[in-house]
Image (cartoon, helix red, strand yellow):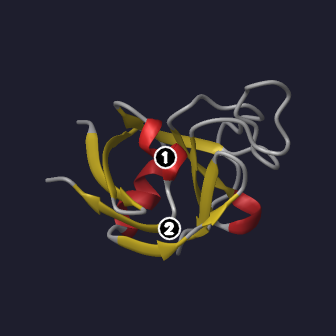
Amino acid sequence: MVKKIKLNIGGNEFQGELNETKTAEAVWEKLPIKASGNRWGDEIYFSIPVKMGSENPKEVVEKGDLAYWPPGNAFCIFWGPTPASVGDECRPASPVNVFGRILGDLSALNDIKSTEVTIEKEE
């Protein structure tokens, strides 16, 4: 069964879904999460209370991907290039575990002023 989540990022609402990985399950078990994120190019990341190793790590991800960065125990939201990117790819600082994605239009992320993030289960 697909696990659906609701994200509020800087006052903008998004829906997402998690994939069927151990990382996704670990994140799901810790929801709801409220955090103040950091922005790195077109990525927001913040520490979460999950400790996982690498699981099918990716060096380049897709726009809208939700990922976990093991070195920082961080939840990452990607929607465009980062300072590490070549061209318009979405490249994390180092490999991440992709565990889900945001559904729909990501354009509102370009205009965010606040990186306050709340993630909840959508039951």
Secondary structure of the residue carrying numbered label 2: loop
- The answer to whether residue 19 is seen in the rendering is no
Residue on which disc 1 sits: 109
Q: Amino acid at mark 2?
A: Ser
Residue 73 quadrant: bottom right
The residue at 50%/49% (across/down) is: 111
Q: Residue 21: percent from the left, percent from the top?
A: 48, 42
Number of numbered labels in the structure image: 2
Residue 70 in sight: yes
Q: Residues within 10 Å of mark 2 (few under 14, many from 20)?
A: some
Image coordinates of residue 114 in percent, x first then y, are 50, 67
Give the residue drawn at x 52%, y 66%: 115
Q: Position of residue 105 (x, y in %)?
A: 38, 31
| Residue under the point 50% across and 43% down | 99
Say whether residue 61 is left or right of residue 94. Answer: left
Left or right: 10 as drawn, with respect to 52? left
Residue beneath disc 2: 114
Q: Mark 1 or mark 2: name the one nearer the start of the chain.
A: 1
Q: Is residue 5 left or right of residue 35?
A: left
Residue lying farthest to the left in this orientation: 123
- Label 1: which secondary element: helix
Camera-nearest residue between 72 and 79: 79
Res 3 label: none
**Which amino acid lies under the numbered mark 1 shown in the image of this protein?**
Leu
